[in-house]
Structures are given as structure tokens and as C-alpha cells.
Amino acid sequence: MSTAILTGQPVPGSSIEGDLRSLGFDVRVAGDAVEAETLLAEVPGDERVALVDARFVGHVHALRLGLTDPRFPLAAIPGAVTARPAGRQALTRAMARENSAGGGTTLVDSLADRVLSALDADGAEVHRPELGTLVAAVPADPQARNEARQAVADVDDETVRLKSAVKARDGFFTTFCISPYSRYLARWCARRGLTPNQVTTASLLTALIAAACAATGTRGGFVAAGVLLIASFVLDCTDGQLARYSLQYSTLGAWLDATFDRAKEYAYYAGLALGAARGGDDVWALALGAMVLQTCRHVVDFSFNEANHDATANTSPTAALSDKLDSVGWTVWVRRMIVLPIGERWAMIAVLTAVATPRITFYVLLVGCAFAAAYTTAGRVLRSLTRRAQRTDRAARALADLADSGPLAESLARVLRRLPARPPLGARFLVALPGAALLVLAAALEPYGSALPVAAAVLYALTSAAAVALPLKGALDWLVPPLLRAAEYGTVLALAAKADVNGALPAAFGLVAAVAYHHYDTVYRIRGNAGAPPAWLVRSLGGHEGRTLVVTVLAALLTAPQFTVALTALAVAVALVVLVESIRFWVAAHQVGAPAVHDEGEPA
């Protein structure tokens, strides 16, 4: 339950009390500032509370944006200020000081605005939503009130609400082919009491049915799969638009939206591979390659963003050129399309599934994603080399967590830190590169059963440990996590392909999917300011270097059929451990009301 305390002189004919009740607030009226403070103290500490000037004139959606968004402990619009439980102490302190400072017992001035000024003076972080054309004001006289009411009448807040439900930055396909109607679907869902999490789940189920249709291997199944994949993407857009339309943000919802996107796409890859196998074409290597490439692209995105999240002096000529190109309308859409974001990528996959073969679909997907990865990575490397950013300890910690180093790498890193000769700061990527490259080459070029990949895995463990022995604060250190991901996933792919027995590549697909989930989960925890996964989880999974060493040893000691069984068992074990811990963490975070972090850009 939420409580709104109306302060100030009541205005005949005002709709503010009804507007607040329509937003779920229990409304109480304070005759003066002292009574307002008393009423504030009576509201339970685990409830949201708002101070609203009784003279407020504005759109209901302005009140909704200012007073009901669950992501911010403190928020305000003109004439109203609100606090969630995390911000109650700051609000109570500001109110008490305002009264003790002689603010007076009368409420001629806006108490809400005075308390907001006190919060600002305390250095409290208060969210002020962008209202755009929406009106939120406390008129000082009847003429100003009439003008404000006319301004409210001139703007349809439902139209503004629908428009704001769409992301400010989306891809071309999403912006012009999905959002023009999905926003109305979001409103339909809101009016029927559906939640974003329910729509997210519906999107997942639709994608899984699409994957099942693709797995039939028939032309009719492929056509149905393509149609259902687009339908799943429509629902995927709708859940976010519903969250923004009704401000139903949640920690659990943010996690579900992010992880289900990956689950849907990679399950569809598996469905295509199964369908191709029914037709006599083995494309599991292509499916696994597409998943590896796409996951590494995401890690590049995450690592670069985390490295520069709070960097100082974060400027470069390359970034300036990019900003300049963004001012030219057509270049914005071209640049958004060539990186093949989720909308364009899923549309391409859906169309190719319906009209071509799974092999052609994967060929086009791999070429497109490889070009997009080269384009984005090259641009970020240029930015990193031409900027003089000072990376923070937080950024270095985030990159170290993304590296996912296990007990072996940690032990080696502790030894290397004691050595007098250390690689220069900024050369971390170059330290890790030789070991990673030799590992993948040995796995790909040596015959199955060779011991050389094991030796390469040992060297890889040493070089990767040396890379993370010092803080990752160099210009290109954000490349270390994606390099380690490519080495681990690429090794599993190469060894499974070399085994050349039925089931090896599907087992490898399952293992990489389970490990990739762990890495995505790490990203979402860091982005949600929840820290990295617990140390026991990382250690129990062995870290990237431990898993790689185990897989190479298994390939050297076991026959190809035995290796397939071992990969399957390893995939099941990893999946069970990471899923149980991940679900436990995110459900617990949701129950304690941790703030959600929603991405407002379209992910790759």
C-alpha cells in the first residue's frame, strides 16, 4: 500500500485526490507542516509515501511518472515528492529539518518543494523524470491555475504515455515494423491486468514452440517456425513497453527479460540444427559456432561498457566523430542496422528459415554477425586507443569478475604478483592472447586424442592468470573477458568437432549454453549493482581455465563416444548448479525489493 499526504490549502473542484487514489495511494490530508510530519511518521517504514501539494495541477501520467516508479528510492516532480522504503530516512530527516528551521505551520508555500530543496541540500539523489509535454505545476493564483488547466487539456496524456512506452533507442526493424502496433498490445495487456513477466514468459513459450516447429525438418514446420519467431519478438517488445507503460519494473522482470532473450535465440538454433539433422544435414557445428560468436559479441559489449561506465577524461576523436555522424539522420539507422541488433537478426533468421535451409540460415547469420562484431569491436578499439580515460577500481573489479577466473588462475596470479618482473599496465590483452590462440589452434588442428591441447590448456591457464594478476585498467583490458570466452567456447567446439561421433556437437552445444548462462548471469548481476556471483559458485565451476583444462584432458583420455557422455554429464552438472543459484538469487532480490535496472538500448 502507498500513502499520499496532501498538503496546502485545498482547491474546490480539484481532481488531485481522485487522481492519487487512481494510482493506488491512500490519501491523507495535513492541515499544516507539523501535522504532515506526524502523518509521515505514522506511515509504516516498508511503504511508499508521497507529499503532494493540494494545489497541484497536471496530468495523471505526470503523477504516475513522478510518484510510482519502483526503480528510484527518491523521486519528485513540481509540487510532489515521494520516497520508497530505501529513501524514507532521507525524506523524514529533510521534513524534520524543514519544520525545525522555521518553515512555519501554515502551508502557503509548497511544503513538497521545500522538502525537495532540503533533500538536494543534503546531497540526496532524487530522480526527476523527463515530463516532456506533460504538465506538473503548483499555480500561485487563479489565473495561473486556469492557464495550467488549459495546458493539461491541450495535451492528451494517454498519447504521451503510449509514445513513452517505446524505447528511446531501438533498431530500424523494431522501430518501424514492430513498435507502431506492439505499444497498443502493451496497453491492451495493461488494461487486462497482465504483468510484464507474464508477457515475457509467453514470449519464451512462443519461441520454444517455434524451435519445436523448426525441429520437425519439414517446409511447413520451417514456415511456422519463422512466423512464430516473429510473434515471439513482438511479445518480447511488448513486455518492455508494458513495463514502461504501467511502470511495472522489477528486479525479477529485468532478469527474466534479459535471460529469456538468450534462451529463446539459442533454443531456436538448436531447433534448426535438429530439423536439419532430420533432413540428413548436420549443422550442429554451425549452430554452436553461431552461439559462440553471438555470446562473444555480447561479452565485448558488456566489457566495453563496464570498463567505461564511470571512467574520467573519457573522450576521444573517434567518439566525437561517432557523435557527429549521429546528427545525420540516415547514418543513424544504417549504423544501427549493420550491427545486426536483435530485431534485424531475428527478422533475418525468421525469413531465411521459412524460405531457405538451416545451413543457409546459419551461413548468413555467421557472416552477418562476424561483420557486425568486426565493425563494433574495431570502433571500440579505436576509441580506447585514442582516449585518455582513467579507469576506476570499480571498472577493474567488474572486468576481473567478467573474466571468471577459477582457483587455478587465482593461485597462479598470486604467485605472479610476487615476481619482480611484471607485464606493463595496459598489456593485459596481449599477455592473454598467445595462450588463448595456441589453445584454440591446438584443439582445432591436432587429431582427436592428442595430448597437445592439454599442454596448450596449461599454458593458457598461465597466460590468463598473468593477464588478471594486476588490475585491468589498461586501454584494451576490456578485451580480456571476451578473449577468454572465445578461447573456452572455441576449444569445446573444436574438440567436439574432432571427436566426429554422433552426439558430440549437441553435447558441446549444451555445455557451452550452460556456461554461457553463467557468464550472462554474472553480467546482469554486475549491471544491477548486485556484485558478482558468490566465490563458491565460481570455484565449484572451476573457472574458465579449469573447465578448459578438464575438457582437454577428457578428450585426451577418453574415446570419442566416452567423451560425448562426459560432455553431456558436465553440461547437466554445470546447468543445475548455475540455474539453482541464479534462480535463488534473483527471486530473493525481487522479494527484498532491490531496484531494477532496465536496458533502454537494443541489445545485440
Image (cartoon, grey):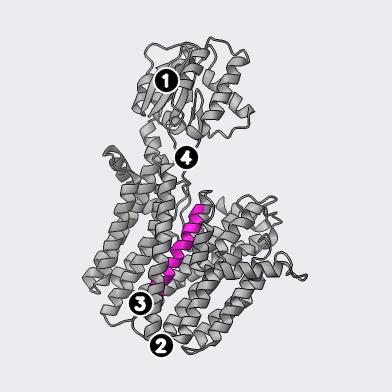
Q: Gap between marks 1 and 3, in whole Å?
A: 62 Å
Location of the N terminus (image quadrant): top left
State whether residue 6 is above or below residue 195. above
Marks 1 and 2 in Cβ contact (< 8 Å)? no
The mark found on residue 71 in the picture is 4
Left or right of 509? Residue 187 is left
Q: Position of residue 483 (x, y in %)?
A: 57, 70
- Which residue occupies 71% across, 56% down? 388
Label 1: which secondary element: helix
Badge 1: few (under 14), some or many (20 or more) residues near its Cα, within 10 Å? some
- Which residue occupies 26% across, 67% down? 212
Q: Gap between marks 4 and 1, in whole Å?
A: 30 Å
Q: Earlier in the sequence, mark 1 or mark 2?
A: 1
Q: Earlier in the sequence, mark 3 or mark 4?
A: 4
The amino acid at mark 2 is Thr
Main secondary structure found in the magenta portion: helix
The mark found on residue 415 in the picture is none
